[in-house]
Image (cartoon, rainbow, N blue to C red):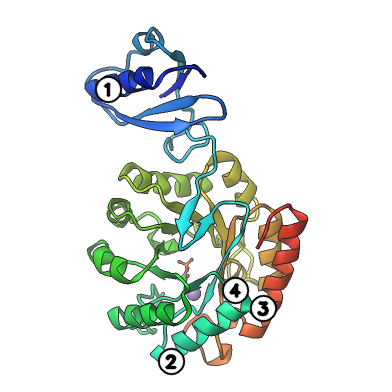
Amino acid sequence: MIILMQPKATAKQVADIIAQVEADGYHPHLNEGENAKIIGVVGESPTPFNTAKYESMAGVANVRRINTPYKLASRELHPKDTLVPLKGNMVGGKKLFLIAGPCSVESREQIIETAHAVKEAGAMALRGGAFKPRTSPYSFQGHGEKGLQWLAEAREATGLPIVTEVMDSALVPMVCQYADVLQIGARNMQNFALLNAVGESQHPVLLKRGMSSTIEDLLMSAEYILAHGNNRVMLCERGIRTFEKYTRNTLDINAVPVLKHRTHLPIFIDPSHGVGYSEYVPAIGYAGVAAGADGVIIEAHLDPENAMSDGRQSLTPHALKNMMETIRKIAGALGREA
Ligand code: PEP
Ligand code: MN
């Protein structure tokens, strides 16, 4: 439910409503709307929600149902864009946030050298997987904690915050020691124990859309993280499976404006996994930015042909730099910065 307060409602009136919501056994969430405060009421309680009682309380303008199954993720409850602070940047604001790096952390030297290269190309954060969700159990699975330590060294060397995947809820505390952003991969988008675990941390989370998940599924997964008390959630469209065979996935450009309309959370696109071939990555990245994405995450490798994973879709630092320059122009044309 949404309790919309009158524009002139006092702090005491807001506090009284929140206390009543808690007394009735629900969870209140206070948000600022354009002109007035909004109190979201979520959760289950044996006490039926009494709309008339709340409507008669001082300072209340109206009470209505949230029309979507996701509540905390919805624009209805939270009209303003959420900004996620990340090392001096505000993700989701006017400035686009650009993340780049290899698919996998391969060695200490590789990740430190790549970190310098992507920073030089304009990246604002370094990506790199230490735990890799591979289709085959015989493919490289990542260097684990050693890879995280190398990522931390790369951050030390360049100042770039680290985005890295966590695949197991038991490992969330350990990954939090090294990472600035916890990536939830497409294959784990509906690993609810993992969503709950990252929801209990206060680390920013980059939640990637499952390859066979709807936009609503993605928002419901975000809801798990939000409902566990972590509101630093960023969503990522990374391509879905279609019948098309000339690309690895199909980046669902539609998802960008639809998500911007339905949720207040920042939206990223991943053109690398979205299309799967480095020669198409820039065009798809530009399309995503033009569609309104708040950020882009791109795979880049010093030597794509010899990458341990996803080399076919990885840009060289030179190609990354060119791509970022064009992104900057597109951002400018849209009244944004990069
Ligand atoms: C990745 O970012 O390298 C990755 C495995 O992505 P996804 O989960 O989107 O496949
Ligand atoms: Mn990858």
Tell me the amino acid under the disc marked 2.
Answer: Glu
According to the image, label 4 marks what residue? 276
The answer to whether residue 278 is visible is no
Front tag of 4 and 2: 2
Q: CA distance from mark 4 to mark 1?
A: 51 Å
According to the image, label 1 marks what residue? 19
Q: CA distance from mark 4 to mark 2?
A: 26 Å
Horizontally, residue 254 falls left or right of residue 64, namely right
Q: Is residue 83 above or below residue 178?
A: above
Tell me the amino acid under the disc marked 3.
Answer: Lys
Q: For the residue carrying disc 2, how many other residues have a C-alpha within 10 Å: few (<14), some (14-19), or many (20+)?
A: few
The numbered dot on residue 229 is none
Q: Quadrant of residue 166?
A: bottom left
According to the image, label 2 marks what residue? 109
Of label 4 and label 3, which has the lower sequence position?
Answer: 4
Q: Quadrant of the C terminus?
A: bottom right
Horizontally, residue 14 falls left or right of residue 270, namely left
According to the image, label 3 marks what residue? 321
The answer to whether residue 14 is visible is yes
Tell me the amino acid under the disc marked 4.
Answer: Gly
Q: CA distance from mark 1 to mark 2?
A: 55 Å
Q: Quadrant of residue 330?
A: bottom right
Of label 1 and label 3, which has the lower sequence position?
Answer: 1
Figure disc tally:
4
Of label 4 and label 1, which has the lower sequence position?
Answer: 1
Classify mark 4: helix, strand or loop: loop
Q: Is residue 121 above or below residue 201?
A: below
The residue nearer to you, when weighing 188 against 179, is: 179
Of label 1 and label 2, which has the lower sequence position?
Answer: 1
Classify mark 3: helix, strand or loop: helix
